[in-house]
Image (cartoon, rainbow, N blue to C red):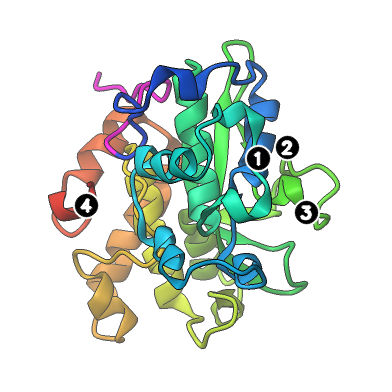
């Protein structure tokens, strides 16, 4: 059976080019690793309140975790475990919180994966585009945690999300198709981008993340652009049904096989 080693790095979480001293003294406890992210990453809206050079805001376009760490080390060469003051954190979205955390967990030999979907705890009644992480110890099932929320007050226990607080793209799609979810209330905060197409897009991104390819939130490939423009039909919806079912099933061989099919595999240009 084809497996997926979630304790090993993927193309965007490989830290092989990072100087070893930068990774000294990282916590061994996965919750502590998750908590470190809010001392290393800052959202663009929060960074906008600081007196930072305009050019720094392009940091949120960086895909590889190693590139995020290079920015951090340029600003401050201290080991990552020391954290950073706000003005010396890398500027990124929830995806960067999740992917940097995922990379550090994998560096520690802890099985980890990023998940793309929607958080229901930022704005009551809405599912907002978001990324979290899952980790698994040898004696546990997958634990879903939100590294970004661990630095906020939106949740009592962001280190262990309970069902319904976060829906992966596939989980949201399955609920929408079953009539349990209003797709017009699922999308990207601060934009007009809400509806089934947003859920389809995150379902595809989540499949890629389960194959250890964690794209940017706005990366598009396959028929995603056509979906956003309302130019896909029932056949594409049926494909997303399969994506949702396969991601929920969690069978590594099925995840790999589906990801390798047409319209779903991330092109090489988006893995660097």
First in residue order: circle 2 vs circle 4: 2
Q: Is residue 111 visible?
A: no
Q: Which residues are magenta?
A: 1-11
Q: Nearer the viewer, mark 2 or mark 3?
A: 3
Q: Indicate the quadrant where residue 260 lies.
A: top left
Q: Which residue is mark 3?
A: 152
Mark 4 vs mark 1, CA separation in Å: 25 Å
Q: Are marks 2 and 1 in contact (CB under 8 Å)?
A: yes
Residue 54 in percent (x, y) is at: 46, 72
Seen at 31% across and 24% down, the residue is 16
- Badge 4 crowding class, 10 Å Cα cut-off, few under 14, some 14 to 19, many 20 or more, is many
Q: Disc 4 or 1, which lies upstream in sequence?
A: 1
Q: Is residue 19 left or right of residue 227?
A: right
Mark 1, secondary structure of its residue: strand
Residue bearing the label numbered 1: 145
Per the image, is 10 magenta? yes
| Other-residue count near label 1 (Cα within 10 Å), few / some / many at <14 / 14–19 / ≥20 | many
User: Real-space Cα distance between discs 2 and 1?
Assistant: 5 Å
Name which of mark 2 and mark 1 comes first in the sequence. 1
Cα–Cα gap, marks 1 and 3: 13 Å
| Of marks 4 and 3, the one in the foreground | 3
Is disc 3 placed on a helix, strand or loop?
loop
Displayed quadrant of residue 87: bottom right
Which residue shows up at 29% across the image and 86% down it? 229
- Where does residue 199 sit, x and y in percent of width and height? 45, 68
Say above or below: 144 vs 272. above
Q: Which residue is mark 4?
A: 266
**What residue would you read off at disc 2?**
160
């Amino acid at each position: 059976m084809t497996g997926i080693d979630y304790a090993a790095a993927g193309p965007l979480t490989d830290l092989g080019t990072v100087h070893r001293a930068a990774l000294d003294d990282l916590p061994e406890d996965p919750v502590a690793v998750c908590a470190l992210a809010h001392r290393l990453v800052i959202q663009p809206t929060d960074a906008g309140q600081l007196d930072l050079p305009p050019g720094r805001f392009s940091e949120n376009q960086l895909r590889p975790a190693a590139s995020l760490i290079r920015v951090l080390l340029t600003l401050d060469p201290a080991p990552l475990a020391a954290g950073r003051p706000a003005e010396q954190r890398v500027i990124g979205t929830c995806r960067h919180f999740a992917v940097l955390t995922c990379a550090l967990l994998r560096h520690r030999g802890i099985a980890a994966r990023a998940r793309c979907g929607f958080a229901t705890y930022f704005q009551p009644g809405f599912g907002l585009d978001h990324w979290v992480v899952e980790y698994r110890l040898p004696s546990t099932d997958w634990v879903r945690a939100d590294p970004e929320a661990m630095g906020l007050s939106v949740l009592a226990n962001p280190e262990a999300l309970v069902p319904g607080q976060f829906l992966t793209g596939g989980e949201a799609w399955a609920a929408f198709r079953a009539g349990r979810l209003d797709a017009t209330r699922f999308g990207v905060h601060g934009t007009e981008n809400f509806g089934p197409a947003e859920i389809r897009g995150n379902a595809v991104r989540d499949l890629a993340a389960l194959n250890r390819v964690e794209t940017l939130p706005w990366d598009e490939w396959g028929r995603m652009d056509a979906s956003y423009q309302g130019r896909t039909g029932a056949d594409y919806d049926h494909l997303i049904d399969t994506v949702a079912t396969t991601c929920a099933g969690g069978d590594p061989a099925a995840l790999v096989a589906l990801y390798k099919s047409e319209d779903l595999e991330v092109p090489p240009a988006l893995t660097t």
